[in-house]
Image (cartoon, rainbow, N blue to C red):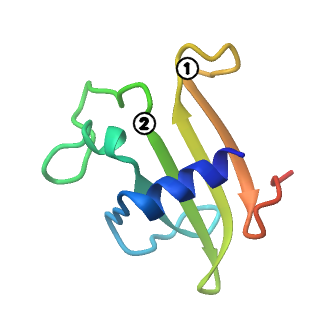
Amino acid sequence: MLLNLALIFFNDFLQIELAPATPSPRGSFKLRFNVTAMAGLDSTGELPSGNSFPAGSTLVKEVYDGGNIDLYAVMKKDPSNFKAASGWIWAEYNADEEPHV
């Protein structure tokens, strides 16, 4: 399951939180990046204009509702995957790790 792989990675290697939970149309959220994705960011934690994340980058968006995680959106850059859209595969999961439909 893509979510489990992303969370295991963050628990075992690196948890980066660039900002506190920020408002969005789906609710407040935090973004987390794996080491490969971090390599694409500059010293301010932003993707430089005109650059793109390298293949193998994984991003996890934790969406909050009332201070609790409500949803995980997971993206992995995998341009060789035939299901990839613009080079990315993605999925959304509820807090109980069941697919979000």
* Residue at 70% over, 19% down: 83
Please name the residue shown 34% across and 27% down the image: 52
Secondary structure at numbered mark 1? loop
Residue 59 spot, x, y in % from top left: 48, 47
Horizontal relation, residue 2 to residue 99: left or right: left
Q: What residue type is labelled 2?
A: Ser
**Which class describes the residues within 10 Å of circle 2: few (<14), some (14-19), or many (20+)?**
some
Look at the numbered disc 2 and give the secondary structure of its residue. Answer: loop
Asked if residue 9 shows in the view, the reply is yes
Q: Quadrant of residue 27?
A: bottom right
Quarter occupied by residue 93: bottom right
Residue 16 place in picture, x, y as percent: 34, 62
**Residue at the disc numbered 2:** 57
* Mark 1 in CB contact with mark 2 (< 8 angstroms): no
Q: Mark 1 points at which residue?
A: 86
Report x, y in % for residue 24: 55, 63
Q: Nearer the viewer, residue 50 or 70?
A: 70
